[in-house]
Image (spheres, rainbow, N blue to C red):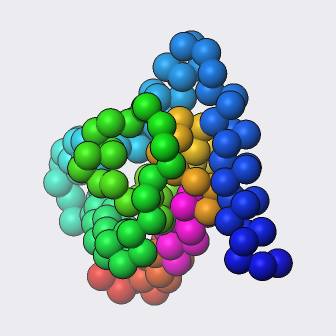
Amino acid sequence: MSLRSFKRFDTTTSQRLQALAGGPVSRTVLAIIAHSADSTVLVPCLFALWWWQEFSRQSIAIPLAAGFALTVVLTAALKFGFRRRRPKGDWGAFYRKTDPHSFPSGHASRTIAIALIVLAEGRPLIGGALLLWTVLVGLSRIALGVHYLYDVLAGYLLGLGIGAGMWLLISLDILF
């Protein structure tokens, strides 16, 4: 597969997914799903979880916050290294202003890392639900036109690596 056909497949598939988000109801539902993985949502949720677990050093919030922070740092570094422009579109003006680069998807990397950390902590039902959430977040980001397919797939790969590393640290009782 040549680079040209690789890019064409990425663009064509992304445009087809964007066509699914045509109506106002579907765009609203997709926007809610997409925003559910925003840092402004996840950071308070992590803090609330830590509070709920009485600020325990054994709280699942600690490895979740570490994995989240690592995805933010590595995703930002990669985005500024690759500098791939976001797809053209009218949704996501905030993202387009504050973070004009789309590769890799930070939403995809952090959601899959969070899901793997929850699975590593021995919570398969919640982890499974989070895996479904990560797929929905990734699809919504493409359908709303703020990412291409390969941005999301690369984000998943990055998050899988971080999540697997965190899983190893958790299973070996290192740090957490």
Q: Judge by depth and name the residue closer to the eye, 62 or 67.
A: 67
Q: Is residue 11 visible?
A: yes
Tell me the quarter of the image containing the C terminus.
bottom left
* Residue 72 appears left or right of 113: left
Residue 74 x %, y %: 35, 75
In the image, residue 176 above or below residue 148: below
Residue drawn 38% across the image and 36% down it: 92
Query: Is residue 135 shown above or below 104?
Result: above
Q: How many marks?
A: 0
Q: Quadrant for residue 48, please give it.
A: top left
Q: Nearer the viewer, residue 48 or 23?
A: 23
Instruction: Tell me which corner region of the image, top left, top right, bottom left or bottom right, holds residue 44.
Output: top left
The residue that appears at 78% across and 79% down in the rendered structure is 2
7 in the magenta segment = no
Q: Tell me if I can see residue 53 in this picture.
A: no
> Looking at the magenta stretch, what is its main secondary structure?
helix
| Magenta stretch, residue numbers | 151-161
Q: Position of residue 90 (x, y in %)?
A: 43, 31
The quadrant of the image that shows the N terminus is bottom right
The one of 176 and 93 positioned closer to us in this rendering: 93
The residue drawn where x is 42% and y is 82% is 169
Q: Nearer the viewer, residue 56 or 133?
A: 133
Residue 4 placement (x, y as % from top left):
72, 71
